[in-house]
Image (cartoon, rainbow, N blue to C red):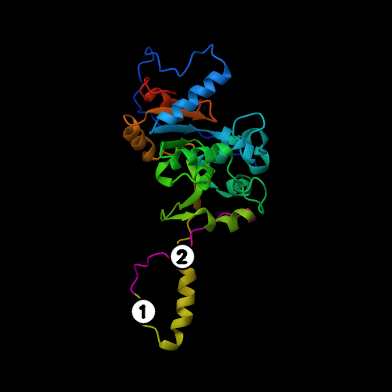
Amino acid sequence: MAPKAKRRRRQKKETIEVIDPTVVPFQLCSSSGTFAEAIAAVAKLLETRKKILVLAGAGISVSCGIPDFRSPQGLYATLDSQELGLSCPEDLFDLDFFSDDPSPFYKFAKELYFPLGTNKRVEPSDSHRFLALLEQQKKLLRVYTQNIDGLEEIAGVSSKRMVYAHGSLQWATCCSCKRRVPASDIEGSIKKGQVPLCQVPRKSQAKKPVTPPTRRMERKRVASKELLCGGVLKPGVTFFGETLQDKVRKSLEADHDKADALIVIGTSLSVAPMSKVIQYLPPSIPR
């Protein structure tokens, strides 16, 4: 099969207000200090703060066996584009490509959902558990994560404290009826490399005919097969060309004046929208 032409990706306009870069941000300790002094400063910060905002990235999940996307050993570098009929690795997460043909994504999806094999579940790292501990200690305001694996919640962070900047594999949405289902509903198809279809009954607008009692059960069985939605189920990940969830913007607006500390963990902040978040927050916040 010939590779499909690479599509132009629609870029979402950023509307986040950026803080004046000339303002010197708060520093915990001198840049010339020792590692021990820096750790002591962080520990003191955690003791005194009650509204900590966390920006998390792939680095906290790599030790769990989940590859990142852009490193030399990451997903894009190891993916066989030609075998999947892709013009480039990024096509795997291109909305237009998926809409035309979702089968390449689901041929590869097992590597995303079951990176350690179908019989072994990925366990959260100590970094994920640290975030859960912050919430247990009533110190966590919000976690903004670039990760799609959902390990923060598996570790114990509540869903109300989570913002998935790039979506999540924890759910899927029907491209036709827009019904959301948990990832467990599509695991069987993923393990087989098949495209999962929506099994939600479709609402029939036609008037039901009067059926003799002896034939009702047979008709009911036939109708249950014919009236299923059958739309393609798309994973909850935000694809290229797809609008970011409005929750990202709304949460940032709500947290702007509440956050009293910022922790950046597992990310170099090189990918939008997370790359803009740190510039949006007041520079007086310890980070």
The magenta segment = 192-207
> Do the residues under discs 2 and 1 have CB atoms within 8 angstroms?
no
In which quadrant is the N terminus drawn?
Answer: top right
- State the image quarter where residue 211 is shown: bottom left
Element assignment for label 1:
loop
The dot on residue 228 is: 2
Q: Residue at x 66, y 38 (%)?
A: 79
- Whether residue 229 can be seen here: yes
Q: Residues within 10 Å of mark 2 (few under 14, many from 20)?
A: some
Q: Which mark is residue 63?
A: none
- Lateral position of residue 82 relative to residue 186, left or right: right
Task: Kindly report the distance in space between the C-alpha atoms of the residues bearing marks 2 and 1.
Answer: 19 Å
- Mark 1, Cα crowd under 10 Å, few <14 / some 14-19 / many 20+, is few
Eye-nearest disc, 2 or 1: 2
Disc sitting over residue 209 in the figure: 1
Q: Is residue 30 left or right of residue 23?
A: right
Nearest the viewer among 198 and 181 is 181
**Whether residue 89 is situated above or below residue 153 in the rendered picture:** above
The picture places residue 29, in percent across and down from the top left corner, at 48, 16
Dot 1 amino acid type: Pro
Find numbered disc 2 in the image and state the secondary structure of the residue it sits on.
loop
| Count of picture labels | 2
